[in-house]
Amino acid sequence: MATTLVFLFTSCLFVKASGTDNLISDEAIAVEFLHNYNEQVIKAFYTGSLAEWKYQTNLTEENKQEMVQADLVYAEFEQAAFRNASRFNVSAFSSEIQRQFRLLMYIGDAALEDKSKLKRLQDVKAELQRLYATTMVCGKPGDEDQSKCYSFDPDIAELFATSRDYSELAWAWVGWHNASGLPLKELYSEFVELNTLAIEANGHTDMLSLWQWIYEVDDLEEQVLEMYDTLKPLYLNLHAYVRRKLIGVYGEDYVNPKGAIPAHLLGNMWAQQWHNVYYLAEPYPGRQPIDITPTLKAEGYTPLQMFQIAEEFFRFLGLLPASEEFWQNSLLVKPDDGREVVCHASAWDFIVGNDVRMKMCTVATMEDFIVIHHEMGHIQYFLQYRDQPFVYKDGANPAFHEAVGDVMALSVSTPEHLYKLGLVDSFENDPENDINFLMKMALQKIAFLPFGLMVDLWRWKVFSGEITPENYNTMWWQLRMQYQGIVPPVERLDEFFDPGAKHHIPANTPYIRYFLSFVIQFQFHKALCIEAGQLDDGKPLHRCDIHKSLKAGKKLADMLKLGKSKPWMDAMEVLTGQRIMDATPLVEYFRPLIDWLEVENEKNGDTLGWDPTWRPPPPQRYTSTGSQIVTSYSLILSVTSWMYFIVQ
Ligand code: X8Z
Ligand code: ZN
């Protein structure tokens, strides 16, 4: 297959170039070359994507081998494309053709010419994904059968979202971090070495410099740090407020009024979004309901119905319907036929026809309802730019791709919209209900910002060599402490590998895209609300719902259709009239809550920030599995089987 493709690809060019060594300056030949490339890359990409889908939806050794082989075939195709493209002198071509060449000539891992290294890199990547996705946590305290094990989706995720038991949460936190992260450590450092070779072979010094190239800026780190500086006061206020509320549940011994927050108490394994602890942070208890999980469960909503609701929202904006292939080929629930799958939600563009798919182990919760909208945003982008050449079938920048579905969710999450959907039984716009709603949104959006930032601050330092395997974990926790103000429930020294306990590290999915998306989605939201006439009568931004606005839908589609054909500043201008990523609309959206939090924190004498030296005491009941060694700050427990340890 590969040889045929490569031959076709090169022969077409050689006819025109007729054996000369000189670079080709004829733009007409370049256009024909790009045309041929587009025809052929689609087939090669499709074959590779199918193999990857097959593996991620059935993590067997056989499927892994098949995928690695397919990756190598695709790499050969890309190498040939690169070689052929190098025969052109692009400098005199139009900027549009130059852009296509520039994008085509970034070939990722395929730049690694040493075949055995390339194969090893693909093997390591596939194995990292499998190890993470198949992690189980065993030996839950209180379980009669101590050999019973739990996977993250749905068991551990649900425990984290619902438990208020300090020790049980600590068990799940330690169990997950030990079982998922630790076994990846060595493989991850090998991955860093090999991937660095690929980055260098593409002409970049390190990962940050590669990503700056992708974002078409030369000061990405400075830009995001500056952006975070303007948003930090919001986070500090939210942090102080939630910390005080946590003290109300767990007491001052476990949550220190001036300390960082224990990482396992925030309703999410990575403390990245805190909406699951809304119950303790609700500013005005007993007001209008804003959590639809009870309704989804009580009324037995199926994942398919949840997807249909989301898809309808897009269609009612005049956007594209999900394709037949989407409904036929997607995996919307975790298979119960014994297959092991990568459960972390993802959207896939197979490029050929309208073959777009979703892979998600959906459960009936509000969290998943929001994730569905997020993923449907990716699907919509795929469909909108389907007529662009291959190299432009991408977001204007990666953050744009992440923002589309979240923008929809900003409208869908409003109490008024949930009421329209029949998912809450009452709604009333008043200032106290607004503050409750904004608190819920802040726990999703503001709480995320420092995590969204620190993941890649860590990864960039790993790939620049500043962080080495010996201090992977210490540096991870240093950044977690510095930015998020959280502390692990037990000491985590460098023998552990806690970054590996987060999907995007073993999967090597860049993360700064989410930080930026959480900022620009409010820019997009505001622009669409203006277009929908939602803000005309002085309605505040957080109450805007663009539901059924064809004008807003058209404006969004105009931007999405561009794909990556223009620098992101141009795409941003089409939708917002601005050429920068700007945090002002986010601040405007949360303004009533920010003012409320400042007053509240001051009234309670809360100090913003945290003392980085404070550590939580060991959990009262403590447990671990197998021969793992769990180190706590004041107590070292070495366990051989399972242990359910009562300290007091
Ligand atoms: O990974 C995702 C999406 C798929 S692109 C579900 N997100 C990040 C995460 O889960 O860590 C969305 C928000 C951040
Ligand atoms: Zn996404």
Image (tube, rainbow, N blue to C red):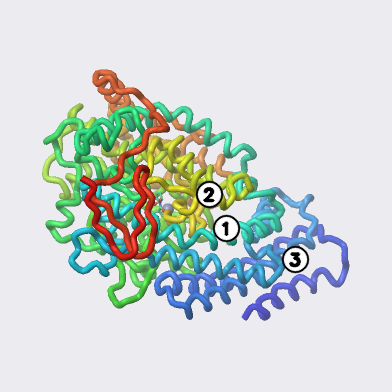
Q: Nearer the viewer, residue 79 or 104?
A: 79
Can residue 308 be seen in this snapshot? no
Left-right relation of 371 to 569? left
Of callouts 3 and 2, the N-terminal one: 3
Q: Amino acid at mark 3?
A: Arg
Q: Nearer the viewer, mark 3 or mark 1?
A: 1
Disc sitting over residue 625 in the figure? none
> In the image, is residue 300 above or below residue 292?
below
**C-alpha separation, residue under disc 3 versus residue under disc 1:** 31 Å
Could you tell me residue 504's position as x and y percent?
46, 55
Q: Dot 3: within a 10 Å radius of its alpha carbon, few (fewer than 14), some, or many (20 or more) residues?
A: few
Q: What kind of element bears circle 1?
A: helix
**C-alpha separation, residue under disc 3 versus residue under disc 2:** 37 Å
Q: What kind of element bears circle 3?
A: helix
Of callouts 3 and 1, the N-terminal one: 3
Could you tell me residue 6's position as x and y percent?
69, 75
Disc sitting over residue 189 in the figure? 1
User: Which quadrant of the figure contains the C terminus?
Assistant: top left
The residue beneath circle 2 is 472
Can residue 419 be seen in this snapshot? yes
Q: Amino acid at mark 1?
A: Ser
Q: Dot 2: within a 10 Å radius of its alpha carbon, few (fewer than 14), some, or many (20 or more) residues?
A: many
Could you tell me which residue is drawn at 44 percent across and 49 percent down? 402
Label 1 close to label 2 by CB (< 8 Å): yes
Label 3 close to label 2 by CB (< 8 Å): no
Could you tell me residue 254's position as x and y percent?
27, 37
Q: Amino acid at mark 2?
A: Tyr
The residue beneath circle 3 is 83
Could you tell me which residue is drawn at 51 percent across and 58 percent down? 185
